[in-house]
């Protein structure tokens, strides 16, 4: 039988797989580990040569100082350190609102593509895709001028509206694919039971499609959380500055302590990271489905 | 007929809100942007706003900053896309094997995706730092360099390290698409090949690669578009410098609009970029569609 030569090939391939897997694990983790470790160091230890790979005097001071900065830190951390707690709140509000609004707008649209046959449907779907391809910078300036004349600069409103431009098309595409996977019979059965359209949608269809809704909401939340260009343009104070804007201030301010900057980075990455870890499977499915399908 | 009509009407009713929002927030601003690009308009001198026709566009042809940023962007896209495709293919192939720890590696592969571009830039900034960075520390302790280097102060160094940082950030997306592609390959194809005693490389060339071509094409499209508009990481890591070594189109555009508040010229930049991206992406999608491998 062929079993004997196969058994001899296996170890060689295994070794390659293990080595490559280990190399990738290091590549993926080490950069993040570096700022993570740094965020728990004292500044003296963080700038030591050769570098400390493990904090020798671990401390939570960097994180605590966002909430009660001492005068010396305010001096070196500039405004950024005081703005961090506000930015965290702003980012949470803006990203959640964006996710919610995305669902409200995209659910009916995606439902129509998954259940109804209508003239111009394909064209419309294509149009949504083209909208997504418009580069952010193309609408940055007119958006700024529009928001200024509406008095929405440095305000949650301008951020949420701008984030809809690139998250809504994706949400519609992702939901459309999830919705198509929901069996039609479920709604038919509900209709036989004399459920109205709204009730069959609310209590039969949407619960079954819930994984898709969660995936789409997480996507929208993350795009909004990570966005930087619009936020840089349209926010100027702690009233609306988001985490990426404040984190960038840490990085571009020459006086900043490395440890404070690292802590700000960790704070800024934590919410999306937690979401990714919790909803891993769904996100992977949604990402694969939401891209152009093959 | 009756039913069809009401169905169409219902569909448009359901798409109405999304259409209105996207029209107001995307289509209108793009039109408005074109209008602004026909003006001399600088926020610093609001009184001097004047209609100048296509002059901003003509100015682009002789604008060294713009032309050099086009070149930089082109090279950046090339480097980032090539590195991403190679690394993502390798990682996806490994993740497609079964070995203990695969689940962990899969989770780890998502880590860079969760990272905001700004944090990515900030992270690599501390790593590449000339006085205290991890890269210097690592290379010195391995005996590969004698003295700490200022990696980001040479134009070539800054360019490639920026590309490297960008690749780290965008890798997961490519990996997931390729992994999804790999999982559609019927396992009996490999079994049959094994019976025929085809080696690892033969199996890769004759089974894996043909099945992977389509997801690879999609990765190519999406990564091209992504790296074309790359901004956050570069802005934080090098700010476009040293000189204009990493001043890609998006960085130049933001500087023109935000720092110099030249909205007229900035809009002209943005319009040229939009047209370029749209031509490229519509071309891609049309090609996929004609091949029958694009589903609406």
Image (tube, coloured by chain):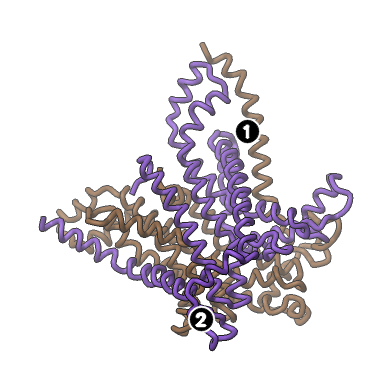
Q: Chain of mark 2?
A: A
Q: From the viewer's perspective, is residue B155 above or below residue A14?
A: below
Q: Residue at x 49, y 82 (%)?
A: A148
Instruction: Name the side, left or right, on which A21 lies relative to A222.
Output: right
Residue bearing mark 2: A153
Asked if residue A15 is positioned above or below residue B73 in the image, the reply reads: above
Looking at the image, residue B153 sits to the left or right of residue B100; the answer is: right
Chain that the image shows in purple: B
Kind of element beneath mark 1: helix
* Residue under the image location 76 percent in, 70 percent down: A257
Q: Is residue A118 left or right of residue A6?
A: left
Residue B118 appears in the picture as rendered: yes
Name the one closer to the observer, B14 or A179: B14
Q: Are marks 1 and 2 on the same chain?
A: yes
* Residue B294 at x, y percent in the picture: 37, 45
Q: Residue A223: in sight, yes or no?
A: no
Note the chain letter of the brown one: A
Q: Chain of mark 1?
A: A
Check disc 1 and report the residue beneath it: A17
- Residue drawn 52% across the image and 66% down it: B270
Callout 1–callout 2 Cβ contact below 8 Å: no
Q: Secondary structure at mark 2?
A: loop
Q: Indicate the position of residue B179 as horizontal and vertical percent values.
A: 50, 41
Residue drawn 65% across the image and 62% down it: B247
């Amino acid at each position: 039988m062929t079993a004997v030569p196969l058994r001899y090939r296996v170890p060689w391939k295994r070794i390659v797989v293990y080595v490559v897997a280990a190399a990738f694990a290091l590549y993926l983790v080490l950069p993040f580990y570096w700022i993570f470790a740094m965020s728990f160091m004292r500044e003296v230890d963080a700038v030591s040569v050769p570098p400390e790979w493990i904090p020798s005097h671990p401390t939570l001071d960097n994180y605590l100082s966002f909430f009660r900065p001492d005068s010396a830190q305010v001096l070196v951390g500039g405004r950024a350190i005081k703005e961090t707690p506000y930015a965290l709140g702003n980012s949470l509000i803006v990203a959640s609102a964006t996710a919610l609004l995305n669902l409200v707008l995209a659910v009916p649209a995606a439902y129509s593509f998954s259940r109804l046959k209508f003239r111009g449907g394909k064209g419309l779907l294509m149009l949504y895709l083209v909208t997504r391809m418009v580069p952010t910078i193309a609408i940055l300036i007119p958006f700024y001028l529009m928001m200024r004349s509406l008095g929405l600069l440095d305000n949650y409103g301008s951020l949420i509206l701008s984030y809809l431009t690139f998250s809504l098309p994706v949400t519609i595409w992702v939901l459309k694919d999830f919705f198509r996977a929901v069996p039609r019979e479920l709604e038919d059965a509900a209709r036989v039971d004399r459920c109205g359209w709204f009730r069959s949608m609310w209590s039969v269809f949407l619960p079954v499609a819930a994984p898709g809704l969660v995936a789409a909401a997480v996507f929208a939340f993350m795009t909004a959380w990570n966005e930087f260009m619009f936020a840089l343009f349209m926010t100027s104070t702690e009233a609306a500055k988001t985490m990426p804007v404040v984190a960038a201030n840490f990085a571009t301010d020459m006086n900043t302590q490395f440890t404070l900057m690292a802590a700000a980075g960790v704070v800024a990455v934590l919410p999306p990271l937690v979401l990714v870890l919790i909803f891993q499977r769904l996100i992977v499915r949604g990402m694969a489905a939401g891209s152009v399908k093959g | 007929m009756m039913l069809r009509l009401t169905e169409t009407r219902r569909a448009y009713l359901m798409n109405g809100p999304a259409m209105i929002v996207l029209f107001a927030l995307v289509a209108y601003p793009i039109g408005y942007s074109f209008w602004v690009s026909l003006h001399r308009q600088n926020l610093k001198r609001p009184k001097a706003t004047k209609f100048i026709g296509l002059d901003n566009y003509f100015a682009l042809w002789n604008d060294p900053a713009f032309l050099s940023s086009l070149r930089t962007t082109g090279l950046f896209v090339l480097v980032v896309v090539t590195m991403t495709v190679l690394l993502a293919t390798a990682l996806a192939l490994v993740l497609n094997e079964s070995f203990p720890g695969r689940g962990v590696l899969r989770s780890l592969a998502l880590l860079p995706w969760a990272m905001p571009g700004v944090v990515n830039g900030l992270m690599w900034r501390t790593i590449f730092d000339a006085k205290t960075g991890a890269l210097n520390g690592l290379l010195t302790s391995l005996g590969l360099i004698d003295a700490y280097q200022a990696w980001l102060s040479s134009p070539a160094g800054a360019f490639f390290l920026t590309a490297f940082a960008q690749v780290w950030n965008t890798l997961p997306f490519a990996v997931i698409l390729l992994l999804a592609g790999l999982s559609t390959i019927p396992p009996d194809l490999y079994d049959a090949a094994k019976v025929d005693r085809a080696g690892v490389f033969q199996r890769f060339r004759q089974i894996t690669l043909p099945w992977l071509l389509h997801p690879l094409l999609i990765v190519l499209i999406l990564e091209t578009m992504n790296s074309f508009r790359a901004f956050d990481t570069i802005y934080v890591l090098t700010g476009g410098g040293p000189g204009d070594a990493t001043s890609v189109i998006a960085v130049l555009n933001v500087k023109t609009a935000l720092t110099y508040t030249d909205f007229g010229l900035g809009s002209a930049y943005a319009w040229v970029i939009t047209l370029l991206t749209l031509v490229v992406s519509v071309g891609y999608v049309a090609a996929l569609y004609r091949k029958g491998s694009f589903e609406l």
